[in-house]
Image (cartoon, rainbow, N blue to C red):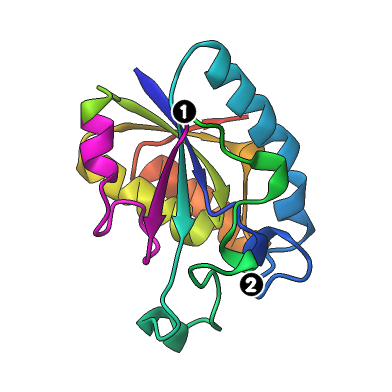
Amino acid sequence: MKALLIIDMLNDFIKPDGVLYCGKKAEEIIPEIIKLKNEFKEKNFPIIYLCDAHEPQDEEFSSFPPHCIKGTKGAEIINELSPEEEDFIIYKTRFSGFYKTDLETLLKKLNIKELYLTGVCTSICIMDTAADAFYRGFKIKIPVKAVADFDEEFHKFALKRLEKIYKAELIY
């Protein structure tokens, strides 16, 4: 069984007025994620949103400006990808969707073996989530048109690393 992970498609990353706007490339992946979401829904495969949700004094803010603070507009999933009732939402405070969350428990409960990772940023949250998925024995697929980064060089490097190190299948 497979699941679609939609990672950090939040106002602070995707909208031009967001605190950590990832750029036009991030906006351009929205239609591809919608397409994948619809395909997964048609086959009754789970959709799981991984969402940054920080406390105001989060230690991550020593590296990045305060963003995706719980309860703010910036921490909300963009309207174009609003979750449906049967979708799952996992809130995270670090780059990996597995770090101190119930993601692994949920995936085991749903008997998921294969993960399709989409969203932002390829070189940060996508790669760290993929690394933790790899260490836990999940098969990883990356639909390349459904991931983006604020830095094109980092994006390209991350895709190479995901493929070579974490055995992710890149889908073009």
The secondary element bearing badge 2 is classed as: loop
The C terminus, quarter of image: top right
Q: Which disc is residue 70 wearing?
A: none
**Label 2 packing within 10 angstroms: few (<14), some (14-19), many (20+):** many
Residue 99 percent across, percent down from the top left: 27, 58
The span from disc 1 to disc 2 (Cα, nearest Å) is 29 Å
Tell me if residue 17 can be seen: yes
Q: Is residue 151 visible?
A: no
Identify which residue is drawn at 60% across, 52% down: 77
Tell me what residue is drawn at x 56 percent, y 83 percent.
65
Q: Name the residue at 27% across, 53% down.
A: 101
Q: Position of residue 30 (x, y in %)?
A: 71, 42
Residue type at mark 2 is Leu
Q: Give, as a three-letter code, the residue at label 1.
A: Glu
In this picture, which residue range is highlighted in magenta? 87-108
Instruction: Give the answer, above or below, for where 87 lies relative to 59.
Output: above
Relative image position of residue 165 (x, y in whole percent): 34, 46
**Is 34 located above or below residue 129 in the figure?**
above
Q: Earlier in the sequence, mark 1 or mark 2?
A: 2
Callout 1: 10 Å neighbours few (<14), some, many (20+)? few
Residue that numbered label 1 is attached to: 86
Instruction: State yes or no: residue 170 in magenta.
Output: no
| Residue 1 picture quarter | top left
Q: On the rendered structure, is 154 left or right of 132?
A: right
Q: Which residue is mark 2?
A: 20
Q: Secondary structure at mark 1?
A: loop
**113 in relation to 50, above or below:** above
